[in-house]
Image (spheres, rainbow, N blue to C red):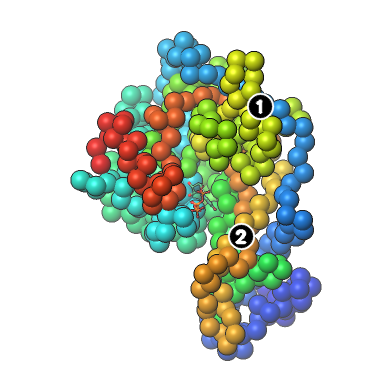
Amino acid sequence: MDFNEAQKLLEKEGQAHLLTYYDELSDEEKEKLIEQISRIDFSVVLEIPKDGCENERGVIEPLGALTIEEIDKGREEYERIGIEAIKAGRVGALLLAGGQGTRLGYDKPKGMFNIGEKKELYIFECIINNIMQITERAGAWIPLAIMTSDINYDDTVSFFKEHNYFGYNSDYVYFFVQDMSVTTDFNGKIYLARKDKVSFSPNGNGGWYTSFVNAGIRDAFVKHGVEWINVFAVDNVLQKIADPCFVGATIASGCVSGAKVVSKAFPEEKIGLLCTEDGRPSIVEYYEMTDDMMYQKDESGKPLFNYGVILNYLFRIDELDRIIDEPLPVHVVEKKIPYVGEGGITIKPDKPNGYKYEKLVLDLIHLMRDCLSYEVVRNKEFAPVKNLTGVDSVESARKLLAENGIEY
Ligand code: UTP
């Protein structure tokens, strides 16, 4: 793309202001800015909510789960199937680590955060320790892909190298970068982060499969024999990865995907609920929950909509290949976005001043033919680190580490 093409495109899209400072830039800066403009996906801006509500929903119904008691009864057989699959190289893992972790207020990748008190214990280290419990048990390495954003790629890769991959076999680790999306003001005007830089932010964790395929890692995984991918979040320090029982139960169920869930702690808990929508699996986010979904009970007195997801999913690769071209909804999120203001100076706002646009992995579940809802014990598997203190925080995660006998 050259300057004239960029100018024409921006005029058509109503974003011509992105070239306001073009004449002041050096040749190198000009080139970079045009290259960034050529990468913009203008269609996301059409998603700005007109009346405050997001997507239209179909008919939502509760979905039960394979309960903890049922899992315990079948554990031996599920684990046997799971371990066999891992040994045969049929299971890969994918760590979503492209988020910005704004709530934690830590300016490095969240995985580099040291959650230790008496000793160093980085979040990435917790994750590697957890997956190594399984590789040791199975006697086989599990291919592990790590998705970062443009912003945190270098830091993440150097950190793993500096720490010698915390003992993991680096031949089985694959880093890749997720796509980015523009940020805009509330009227859909794309922000400049600097005079020579369009404001991009990570486009959510939902686009991981496309980025994973485009980076050539799907093919590398398939070469290892991988058929199933366990996708999980960076910020749960008790995350069980490639859990043989979960893998085995999902394979045995005949479903093409699985989701770990926990029983709701209280009716209003802010957790995405695994349900069905028009007969297919679907996740309803906490802000979409109706009173009925919060308070209705089943005949045994348990909440009717009871099972919340913890961002630990299992997907069969052939099913992901089938749906790869299906569009995912774009979620519009209010955010504080640094931008170039009057006189070309970058301003850091202290309250939300625009939107970022995200696709979410939870929406992939709705594209799956079916999904095994698999219940886990909350205090053994769910210690999210979103904030420094309070709910889902460093504080609460430390308590859970102690409860599970993990030194920190
Ligand atoms: P969160 O939804 O908690 O977002 O991510 P975040 O950006 O890390 O944190 P906040 O909201 O700014 O405080 C859930 C998981 O999805 C990953 C995160 O790294 C985390 O593992 N993620 C999120 C991505 O990989 N890419 C993204 O664009 C967003």
Q: Residue at image x 55%, y 67%?
A: 351
Name which quarter of the figure residue 270 lies in: top right
- Percent from the top left, x then y, of residue 338? 53, 71
Determine if residue 210 is in view: no
Q: Which mark is residue 171?
A: none
Mark 2 neighbour class, 10 Å CA radius: few under 14, some 14 to 19, many 20 or more: some
- Decide: marks 2, 1 in contact (CB < 8 A)? no
- Percent from the top left, x then y, of residue 104? 42, 54
Q: Is residue 354 left or right of residue 229?
A: right
Q: Is residue 76 above or below residue 221?
A: above
Looking at the picture, which amino acid does disc 2 mark? Glu
Mark 1 neighbour class, 10 Å CA radius: few under 14, some 14 to 19, many 20 or more: some
Quarter placement of the C terminus: top left
Residues 104 and 255: in front is: 104
Q: Is residue 379 left or right of residue 60?
A: left
Mark 2 vs mark 1, CA separation in Å: 31 Å
Q: Which mark is residue 296?
A: 1
Q: Residue at image x 58%, y 37%?
A: 268
According to the image, label 2 marks what residue?
334
Residues 88 and 202: in front is: 202
Element marked by disc 1: loop
Between circles 2 and 1, the one closer to the viewer is 1
Determine if residue 166 is in view: yes
Label 2 C-beta lies within 8 Å of the nearest ligand 1 atom: no
Looking at the picture, which amino acid does disc 1 mark? Gln
Q: Residue at image x 50%, y 31%?
A: 265
